[in-house]
Each structure stands twice: as C-alpha cells, then as structure tokens.
Amino acid sequence: MRAMAPSLGTAAALFAHSSVAFCQTTVDTRMERDTVNARSRPGYEAAGIPLGSFQLQPSASLQTLVTDNLYARSDVKVWDVSVSVLPAIALQSQWKRHALGLTAEGAIDRHFSHGTEDNARYALGAEGRIDASAATRISADLSFARRVEGRGTTGDTLFGAKPIAYHQLSAGLSVDQDFSRTKISVQGRFDRYRYSDRQLGGVTIDLSPRNYEAVSGEFRVAQGLSPGVAAYTSLSYNHARYPAQAAGASRNSHGFAALGGLALGLNRLLQGEIGVGYLKQSFDNPLFPTISGLDYHAQLRWNPTRLTAISFGAGKSVQRSPLLAIAGVEQQTFTLAADHELLRNLNLRPAATYTISKYRGSPRRDHYGSVQLAVAWLLNDRVQINALVGHVLGRNSDPTQTARQFDQNRVTLGVTYRM
C-alpha cells in the first residue's frame, strides 16, 4: 500500500516486484545465480533438516549492542550495552508445484545498566502459493507479531516510560495471471495494530487512540516491450480507521495512488523498476488537510561485477501519525547500499539512508539519516559472525522538540548458529 503505509519511521512502502519477475524471464538464469547475493557457496550453506517433503531450518543468534545514546536524545545522553537472544525456525515445502512456508522468530533484549529498556519481541508467519496453472498463481500470507517502537523513531513518543509496544496482525491475498507478454496482478491486504498501555510517573497512559486498521488493494498490469524491459501501470486504494478514537476527533481516511513506469531485467548488470505518478489521501475530519501530489518509486540493483552489487531505493508514502492533533505524515525515503564479496565467505555491506517526514497541518519537519558498515563472515555451514558499526542522527524543525534532535553511534557484534 502506497498511502497510509502500515508502519512508522520505516522506508516508504514499495510495490511488489511482479513486473520485475516478468522481465527476468528473458534473463539467462545462470547469470542471475552468479551474483554476490544469489551465488551458491558450497561448504558455507546450512543444509537444514529434511522432514518428508519439507525442510526445517532452525537457527539461534546471540548479539551484543553498544550505544553511546541509548534514548536517542540530546538532553539525556547515556551509554549502555545490551545482549539479545534471537531464536528462529522456518519450515519450507520442497514441492515442485505449490508452496507452503511457516516461520517463527523471537528476540529477548536485556540491558546492563537500564533495565527499563528490556523488551521481548516475536513474530509468527505463514505464506503459501497455489500454482493453479503455468500462467496462474494464487498467493496468501498471514502473520502476527509483537513489535517495539525504536528509540528516536517517529513512533517513540513517551520518554521516561518503557519503549512503546504493539501487536500487529497482517493478512494478504494476491493473484498473478500471465498472458504471453502481459502480466496482471491483483492483491489485497489487511493490517491491524493494537498498542499496549504504558506507565509514566505512576500514571497509566492509554495508548488505545493509536490503534489502527487499514484495508488496501492494488491492480497492476505489466506489458513486455522488449527482452528484459516491461512497462507497468498500477492503481491502489486504501481505507484507514482508528477504532478507539474520541468522538468528533476522527482521523479516518481513504486514498489512492496511481503509478506508471518501467521494470528492468535486462541482464545481471541492471535490474529493478522505476515509476512516477500521483497520490491523494483524504481525511474524514475537514480540519485535517488532504495530502496529495507527486508520487514516485525506484528500486534498482546494479551488479558491476560478479563480486559487487549496488542497490538504490527512493519512494514516497503517507504514514499514520502518532500525534492525535495530526492525521498524516508525508514521508520520503532514500537508500543506497552495497554488497561486496571480499572473500568467498566474507561480505562487506555498507549502507546509507535518509528520510524526510513532513507533518501535514503543522510546520514540523523531521529528518533522519544513517550510515553503517556491516560485515558477514561465514565460518562454516553452521556458524556465521556478524558485525556492524553505524551512526544515526535525527533532526526536527519544532523548537519545542529540541531534545528529540540526536546523534547516536552503535556497534553490534553477533554470532549465528544454523542447522
């Protein structure tokens, strides 16, 4: 869904890559498998556990994080070290036709000096695909998760209380139909968020007004123009509501987005898509201004060599606002990342992001940026070492929110065991 994207402080929602896959049917699949992200690495890949026609893939990670600004603020700047345990398990079918996958993952965070930041997260998911014919595929997914608003993000609105937690239920259904050089995709999605109350200074803070539901749908057509190039057009619609909002303070809305552009799968060198269009989000309450204007989306991957991949992303979306006096946030996000295979079992992954959030109906503007360098070192088919060094910053134009302007340095070291 392009408008009223379902999460706060995240990159703009991107279109499903149906037309990209359509283009890549003309690409030599041997070339596609010989890129840094897709290449097979014998001796360094977990085999999993066969269970009949399924494969079980359990894993567990232990991660340590050191930060010099735990709360992502300028007025209270403290160091801390945290340790996280991250178990995960996946069950995937090995059928020639159709597919079914189940996943479960968790995270338990414990801090050495600031126990109020301790938390637990989890996610359960299922996804499947029915191959009705060689040209018709029906896909569905369902997930339920407990998540936490990260410190310094748009949704982090309660300093002095435990990080804000919420439960997310998501479900989606899509149908893809091929007609020779034309591909049609129809999809629908439902997202529901329920926020947990918090204690601040001995007072219970009711966060139910942030509870949120959204229903969205998208119709997309991709037409092949030449080998590896397709033109696509997409029209999406969404309806969002806050079930626990106060009477007379409705932030419910509906909107649409129309995009058109090109999907590229010319060869291993350049793949992705780029499009421009128009979006509009209207609110039931006339006090909240309509958000409308230019929409755009780009997601490109360039493989200059077999050892290096460079990705660029840009997009615009409308996010829900955590503030009751503001209904929508117009957000633009830009990402640049690379993946370089220094050795067959050692990858370097630098990345940078920049996000601009405009609170419509208010002069407030938030700017977030990050740079990081991650390293993934495969010791063998069971053990992987991960390390990351990064810097995050946040700036805003509201003179009453100067404490929310921050710089934060983060160092992460972790080990993952896979079966």
Image: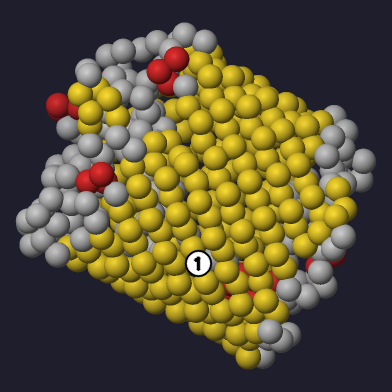
Q: Residue at x 87, y 60 (%)?
A: 52
Give the quarter of the image for residue 148. Answer: top left
Which image quarter holds the C terminus? Answer: top right
Which image quarter holds the N terminus? Answer: bottom left
The spot of residue 299 in percent (x, y) is 53, 58
Q: Considering only vertical position in the picture, is 35 above or below 404?
A: below
Q: Considering only vertical position in the picture, is 99 above or below 149?
A: below
Residue 144 appears left or right of 23: left
> Which three-letter amino acid code belongs to the residue tagged 1?
Gly
| Classed neighbour count for the residue bearing mark 1: other residues with Cα under 10 Å, few (<14), some (14–19), many (≥20) | some
Q: Residue at x 27, y 14 (%)?
A: 75
**Residue sitting nearer the eye, 62 or 395:** 62
Q: How is the image coloured?
A: secondary structure
Pick out the residue farthest to the bottom.
Answer: 179
Q: Is residue 315 visible?
A: no
Residue 399 appears left or right of 175: left
Residue wearing tag 1? 172
Give the quarter of the image for residue 206. Answer: top left
Q: Residue at x 21, y 61 (%)?
A: 252
The spot of residue 209 in percent (x, y) is 22, 46
The spot of residue 54 in percent (x, y) is 81, 59
Q: Is residue 244 visible?
A: yes
Q: Residue at x 53, y 55 (%)?
A: 143
Callout 1: SS: strand
The spot of residue 187 in percent (x, y) is 49, 74
Pick out the residue farthest to the right.
Answer: 43
**How many numbered markers are drawn?**
1
Q: Considering only vertical position in the picture, is 379 above or below 129?
A: above
**Residue sitting nearer the eye, 37 or 209:** 209
**Residue sitting nearer the eye, 111 or 312:** 111
